Image (cartoon, rainbow, N blue to C red):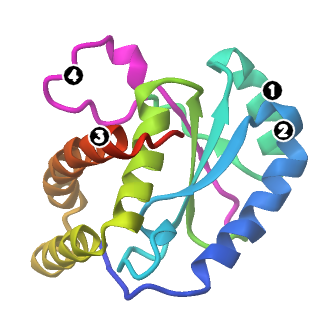
Amino acid sequence: MITIVPYDARWPEEFLALARPLRAALSELALRIDHIGSTSVPGLAAKDIIDIQVTVRDFTCTPELVEKLGSLGYTLAPEITQDHLPPLYQGPEADWEKRYFRPPASLRPMHLHIRALGLPNQRYPILFRDYLRAHPMASAAYAQIKMALSRRQPDDVEFYYDIKDPLCDIVIEAAEEWAQATDWQI
């Protein structure tokens, strides 16, 4: 079920509480640990799910990830291997490869995405987040659409993402222009 709730000022602290043990377990394997997704944008209504992106050098470390994250109770979801491919993307589909780990039941709702340094899908959520943080009107419009989608088809997750993913691709197009104009760097 898709439920969008008002922004919760506790989300940044909840991210930090989730990220600390990840940093300790992954050590130098994690090049970055970022709070991404709607809960990372102040004021943005969202599903009450903390999205975390761990950046690794490449996926040759997958066995080590499975071991180290497994020690914290996370399990690899082998069926989730790729992100949504934006329309008209010119590069290989492998540019959107990822690993996804399910959290232990004892943790608050969260998603753990592992992406490789320098790939478009590693940059996308960070740029998306920073663009929405810098553009409150775009953030508010994005929230309006998500809330409308969740009200119309709350039990149809596929419907929600069939609309939301292309919407994100539209936003990222504007974000790319903003990144160039402001010399934004990841």
Disc 3 to disc 1, C-alpha distance: 34 Å
Amino acid type, callout 2: Lys
> Depth check: 166 or 129 in front?
129
The residue at which mark 3 appears reads as: 176
Amino acid type, callout 3: Glu
The residue at which mark 1 appears reads as: 64
Amino acid type, callout 4: Tyr
Examine the residues drawn in magenta and state their main secondary structure.
loop
Disc 2 to disc 3, C-alpha distance: 35 Å
Look at the image and give the residue range highlighted in magenta. 82-105
Image quarter (top left, top right, bottom left or bottom right) of the C terminus: top right
* Crowding at mark 2 (Cα within 10 Å: few <14, some 14-19, many 20+): some
> Depth check: 144 or 180 in front?
180
The residue at which mark 4 appears reads as: 89
Element type at marker 2? helix
* Horizontal arrangement in the rendering, residue 163 relative to residue 178 (left or right): left
The residue at which mark 2 appears reads as: 68
